Image (spheres, rainbow, N blue to C red):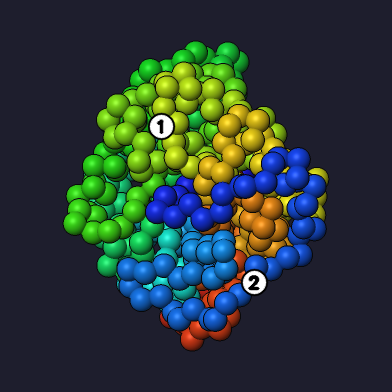
Amino acid sequence: MRIVALAAACLAATCVCGASDSRSQRFKSWPLGRATLQQKQPTTTAQAGNHLRCDPSRSDIESAGSNFVLSNMGRYNENHILTDDSVKPPFVEILENPDKVKAQLLRLYTSGQRKISTVIWHAPLTNKNKSKSRVGYLVNSGGDGVHRSIYAGIEAYFEAVKETGFQDVVIRFGGQGCSRALNWVPNNRIQCPTSYSQEIEDDNYALISNVHGMLDRIFAGTSVNRWYDLALEGGGLPEPFSTYATRIWERYVSDFGVADTHGFSIAYQPGRLTQLYRVYDRVGVRPGAVAVDMYDGARGKRPRMLTMLKQFAQEMDKIGLTGTPVIIQESYYNHKPTYQAVASAIQAGMNIQAVYQWPMDTKDYWYDTPSRYDAYCPALLDKPVAREASLPVKVAEQSRVR
């Protein structure tokens, strides 16, 4: 089973790599993808509250981190079923095994990661699952709303994130099934509404609003940045999702402004960024950064990472986004070729500020504790950061969770 993947986060404090060359000059001079950014003196391991500088050159990329989305894979390695109740997001696992989740968070942190992204996959559950708080990775967001136990888990989890010391926190809302407006069409095969559903829009927005309020309370008085992805990989999708995104964006901007959101992340395809910005412009407000999911096409039909970054930069230029901060919200786990492509793109003038890895490598292995990040952050290779697990890493084979 494939499910839509998540994440978004921005380092709004530093715009480090504006484009000074003309577009034609910039793209003609792009390196071939094997560049590594010049290193200055090794940076010491970051202390709590400080970001580790991965590339202390003019690009000054900060160490980002991982999409930490499923801390217990359960029997997935045997049955390949994500809706098995033994499959648990960290905010569910923490209620039953808090020491394990806290140890996982600490392992991410001590390996040099200072940012963390969490996905809340949700859908209105029906039939025999209607009364359940969740089914496997899915939270029940229908009926009377999200169950109190789920909110209790979300609160406990983000308290642990705060205590661990992460400085940037991304919250991604991943509507599935009938929570996904793209499915509100005639003759859909999963018994969703056949036209626009105001009720489901309201349910989805209630989850966004409630989690936002909770995190405001949890992180009050701290310097921790929060970034909200309002619909994971929802950017640039066609109707009725475009109408849904416009309405959700309008509600969010009215309630919370734009300082803590990248809007809607994009699963990269040419043209989706342009479509997404039409949504923002209908409301009259744009976010301050772009969050995009990109996976290098070292195998399969997908283009190579540098090709996609070139295409993306050209599309940004065409709609007036040259120099806008870009967050790679998902990419392969600890993948050096992706880093080399990102380094080349930065040298060509793209303002890429961070890369968040998805816990899946190019061989489709899943890591429930995606602690290694040194391929994206070479400075970590010279640091005495912890590399041994306090808990064993479970590795499960799957076709990427998206």
Task: Return the x and y of residue 22 as percentages of the image width and height.
Answer: 69, 41
- Residue 337 place in picture, x, y as percent: 72, 63
Point out which mark residue 105 bears. Answer: none
**Circle 2 Cα neighbour tier, 10 Å, few/some/many (<14 / 14–19 / ≥20):** few
**Picture residue at 54% right of the left edge, 77% below the top:** 380
- Front tag of 1 and 2: 2
Residue 351's place in the image compared with 35, above or below, is: above
The secondary structure type at the circle numbered 2 is loop
Q: Which amino acid does label 2 sit on?
A: Gln
**What is the number of the mark on residue 38?**
2
Q: What element carries label 1?
A: loop
Mark 1 lies on residue: 124
Query: Which residue sits at x=45%, y=71%?
Result: 52
Q: Which corner quadrant of the image does residue 218 belong to? A: bottom left
Mark 1 in CB contact with mark 2 (< 8 angstroms): no
Is residue 210 depicted above or below 392 in this figure?
above
For the point 38% across and 57% down, the residue is 168
Quarter of the figure with the C terminus? top right
Image coords of residue 8 (percent x, y): 47, 47
Q: Residue shown at 29%/43% (left/top)?
A: 211
Amino acid under disc 1:
Pro
Position in image of residue 197 (x %, y %): 42, 18
Mark 1 vs 2, N-terminal side: 2
Gap between marks 1 and 2, in whole Å?
Answer: 50 Å
In front here: 152 or 52?
52
Tell whether 368 sits left or right of 226.
right
